[in-house]
Image: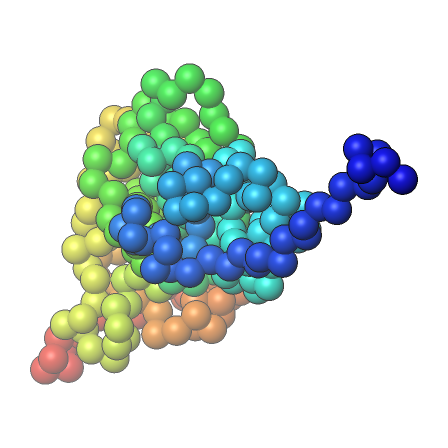
Amino acid sequence: MARWCQPVKRAVSTRTYHLTNTRFTRHHGTVLHNVVSMDQAIASGYSRRQVYRLVAQGKWLRLREGVFLPTSNADAEELWRANLAALLLRHPDAAISHRAAAMLHAMEGVTERTVEATIAASAHRSPRGVHRTRYPDPAPVLVEGFATTSVERTLRDLAAVSSAAVVEQALESKLRGPDPRRPDQWNTALLTRLRESVDDGRSLPGTFRLRSVLARRSDTDRPTGSFPETLLIQMTRELGSTSCVNPPSKSPTGQA
């Protein structure tokens, strides 16, 4: 056989690609929940072709356009947090909000792992999972590395997408503090801030529902002691009892 017509033997690459935090953080600082963009991958030594090949092989997961999770063995919790990180990586001006923020704030009653964030209404379009508003949270907080709406704003946003019962459960969990047996740890200031926020004149979705939940309790009502107690009070209310209001809080001396 002539030399020019002999088949070409192409070298088969046996190189494997694994994400190491050191590799990416060397170029881009902290990598939030192992999520990387295409630019980060390229700057760390990968080519676009290699990235797409890894996705096609199932070794990497494509979370959003140009955003990847370099693993295929993520559990449900890890995948949810990775999707939150991917959303913020694509939209750095957004803040995790609504049910997703309630989950990060460990609010009771919210069990669905949604991927939600809020961005200013000036944005050209609303990406998947992003709410637009004319009144973005002016003071988002960092929760587990995520830019997240504050507790007050999260409760107000939650009221726009959840029932009054869920909002009440979430509210009680944030009012009682770390030890519901200690009145000095009750977050009574939160109730005051919420009452002020619903009367600030801004027409945010969920305002009416949150106001109705706040109207069910007075400033002297103690927070519920646990999630089951909150459920019991709600069930009693549904059965038509009028004596289901939380008992008044007591001072350290035992007097109401």
Residue 112's spot in the image, x, y percent? Answer: 54, 55
Residue at 15% from the left image edge and 82% from the top image edge: 254
| Residue placed furthest toward the left | 253
| Residue placed furthest toward the right | 1
Q: Nearer the viewer, residue 166 or 16?
A: 16
Residue at 26% from the left image edge and 55% from the top image edge: 218
Position of 50 compared to 245: left or right? right
| Residue placed furthest toward the front | 2
Residue 166's spot in the image, x, y percent? Answer: 47, 54
Q: Quadrant of the C terminus?
A: bottom left
Number of marks drawn: 0
* Above or below, comparing residue 97 to residue 31 in the picture: above
Q: Nearer the viewer, residue 138 or 176?
A: 138
Res 115 seen here: no
Residue at 18% from the left image edge and 71% from the top image edge: 185
Residue 174's spot in the image, x, y percent? Answer: 30, 61
Residue 170's spot in the image, x, y percent? Answer: 39, 57
- Tell me where residue 72 sits by quadrant: bottom right
Q: How is the image coloured?
A: rainbow
Q: Quadrant of the N terminus?
A: top right
Q: Nearer the viewer, residue 137 or 235?
A: 137
Res 138 seen here: yes
Residue at 49% from the left image edge and 67% from the top image edge: 231
Position of 186 compared to 228: left or right? left
Q: Nearer the viewer, residue 239 or 108?
A: 108
